[in-house]
Amino acid sequence: MAGRILIVDDEKDMLILLQRIISEETDHELVTITNPHKALELFKKNHFDLLITDLKMPKMDGIQLLEEVKKIRSNVSVIILTAYATIETAVEAIQKGAYDYITKPFRRERILLTIEKVMEWQEMVRENLALRQALAEKSDFSPMVGASPVMKDIFECIRQVAPTTATVLITGASGTGKELVARAIHQNSLRGSRKIITVNCTAIPEQVIESELFGHVKGAFTGAWKDKKGLVEEAHEGTLFLDEIGDLSPNMQTKLLRLLQEGEYKPVGSTVTKRAELRFIAATNHNLKSDIKEKRFREDLYYRLNVVNIDLPPLKDKKQDIPVLTYHFLKKYARINQKDIRDISPSAMQALLSQEFSGNVRELENIIERSVIFCRTDTLEVKDLLLDNEQETLYPDMDKDMSRISFKEAKDRMILMFHDQYIRSLLRETRGNISKAAEMAGIQRQYLHRLMKKSGIDAASFREKDPDHPPSP
């Protein structure tokens, strides 16, 4: 569909070049101008779908022009062109609402493809105008729950970022609800009627994650007996949620960067480049800045992902939310388990408020689910909660008060104890070498790393000199 484009650059030769490239390949109506102030006046009096502007201009630069046109019409798309590319200015441009940031000299195909994507996006905006109005009035993000000031700020951030195309990086410890935030952003976006595809970068083995993401062609490797569509293609025109992005291998980080930058990828074993039009949301419990310093994570990929950052605090830092979360989970699991449990006693609530919740919201939810299952009255009491301080009196002596816990709970705890003792033994033997420990155990390194995190085991503590195992000569 043809649209209206305003091009601003103080160099007339660049305006002529852009006009020729765009006019030869498209039917869009073009207006070119060298003065950004006059461009702003023109924008106030006319409708444009797209603004293409140079970054460095006298009197008013491209970022300032971007900010001013966004005040006039927030949903206009803006492309920034510059010969002075830096990561900082690129991030600033995207954060302030630019659709893309293109460096000079640019490829003819790149500018044309970006314009095509802009016009498709503008069409989607027009088709979903009523949905956008509904989103502006929406006040909750079920099933997300929270009443603390920090959660209200997060809800407001979701409300603002959801209708945009911005890539979002969600950070926070395990169990804080990162996937819920990702789904809230998707469901309240213009892509809400399309798919959100989740990729768990930790759960998928490194040897197969490329095929899972990008797909493969028949004969690409042993066992590839037919073509397979990847998760990126599944997410086309929807949202791709990359969970635990910090665990992605360096090789896959490079390939993912190309997908984010160019929207291009190749299925494994194929020579054909495919395109994907989708939104990216990533999540991690890593400190990616530390990972960058230690060369475990690409800095350029970090800045591509970290356009908008939503940081989820641990539950212990927002205890004001514990009562509302408790009643939310109580209602949910009473309904699922068909139990007539309506309340929680003041003493039980106080016991919950006194907990540290190292497992965050997920730990609270597990406690309430278990409590609902074993509660025999219409009110949860302290004895129903089986909190950590009570649980610790049951172990390691497994013979004491065994009647107070279920078979499944006893089994789960023994498995955790086994994991802890076995992994510590392996790491002592290998003096903290995780790869060697995984090889000895006959399991994937990533799986061992997950078990270590779950048990709170730090490999570094095993790397000191062991008198019983002197270093090899």
Image (spheres, rainbow, N blue to C red):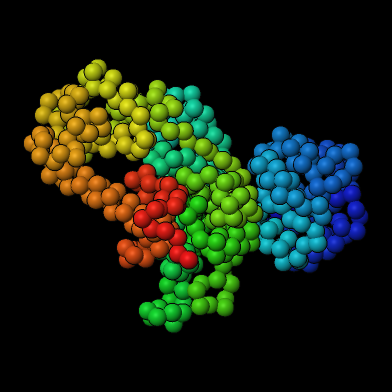
Residue 144 appears in the picture as rendered: yes
Q: Quadrant of residue 295?
A: bottom right
Q: Is residue 326 left or right of residue 146?
A: left
What is the x, y in percent for residue 388?
26, 32
Left-right relation of 364 to 14: left
- Please name the residue shown 57% across and 76% down the image: 272
> Which residue does the image show at 17% across and 47% down from the upper left?
411
Relative to 216, say whether 95 is above or below.
above
> 127 or 145: which is nearer to us?
145
Q: Residue 373 falls in which quadrant of the image?
A: top left
369 left or right, relative to 172? left
For residue 397, above or below residue 16 = above
Q: Is residue 247 above or below residue 135?
A: below
Residue 75 % position (x, y): 65, 42
The residue closer to the viewer here, 289 or 437, is 437
Of residues 132 and 306, the one nearer the viewer is 306
Q: Residue at x 40, y 63 (%)?
A: 436
| Residue found farthest to the left | 403
Asked whether residue 203 is in view, the answer is no
Residue 247 x %, y %:
47, 55
- Residue 51 % position (x, y): 75, 48
In the picture, the quarter occupied by the N terminus is bottom right
Residue 38 is left or right of residue 448, and the answer is: right
Residue nearer the viewer, 456 or 321: 456
